[in-house]
Amino acid sequence: MTTPTPDSVADTTLGWSLAVLLRRWHELTESSLTDIPHGSRGYHVLTAAVHADPPTQAALAERLLIDRSVMTYLLDDLESAGLVRRRVDPGDRRVRRVCATERGREVLAGARDRVDLVEEQVLAGMDGPSRALFRASALRAAIAIQRSSPATDPCAAVREVTGGGTGAGTASGGPRAPGGGRARRGA
């Protein structure tokens, strides 16, 4: 395989650049998050449960753009691993709030360090100020897209770029991985 040169990539698109970055981020992130059920998806759920008022299960699915039935399986596995618990909302007994456990907080702290390292590896071709600008710009663009089109599914984009991720079939509540947990899939 030939290494691209500035001249050979001059006519590439933003989509190509983002796909290359996303694919590498996904590969490294999934391999670094083996202690969290569903890898990066589980990581995002755990992050939301730790850093916000306990979200409802439905609000969490909407915020992370994960189908509600898939969210149920994901939470089942996170709960079985002792990382989250669902508790009945005192104001509406039909609603479940997702709360991180102490173990979940500890696991997330280590996972956050590993994800930070992955991000540094993925963006290693840029100097520090450029990395900071890229992160800030990407965040602003993602927020703008989410606000204008809340149905946009970033997990679907990851699956498309990565060729389906690992554990294809999990999104529909598909097969379990060895050891009883659901196989990881996508973001």
Image (tube, rainbow, N blue to C red):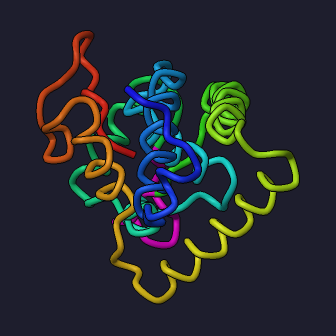
In the image, is residue 5 above or below residue 179? below
Q: 97 or 160: which is nearer to us? A: 160
Q: Quadrant of residue 95?
A: bottom left
Comparing 104 with 154, the one in front is: 154
Query: For this rendering, which residue is in front, 166 or 131?
Result: 131
147 relative to 113 in the view: left or right: left
State left or right for residue 38 relative to residue 106. left
Can you give x and y, in whole percent of width and height, for residue 74 in the image?
A: 33, 41
In the depicted structure, whether residue 94 falls above or below residue 26: below
- The overriding secondary structure of the stretch rendered in magenta is strand
Which residue is painted at 41% across and 52% down in the image?
Answer: 19
Residue at position x 39%, y 69% from top? 62
Magenta residues, start to end = 86-96
Point 44% across, 66% down: residue: 13
Residue furthest top in the image? 179
Q: Residue at x 52, y 39 (%)?
A: 25
Residue placed farthest to the right in the image?
129
Residue 95 painted magenta: yes
The location of residue 6, given as percent across then percent down, is: 58, 50
Q: In x, y percent, where is residue 137?
A: 69, 69
Q: Residue furthest bottom?
A: 148
* Quadrant including the N terminus: top left
Q: Is residue 14 left or right of residue 173?
A: right
Question: Does 80 lie within the magenta span?
Answer: no
Residue 64 location, x and y as percent?
Answer: 44, 61
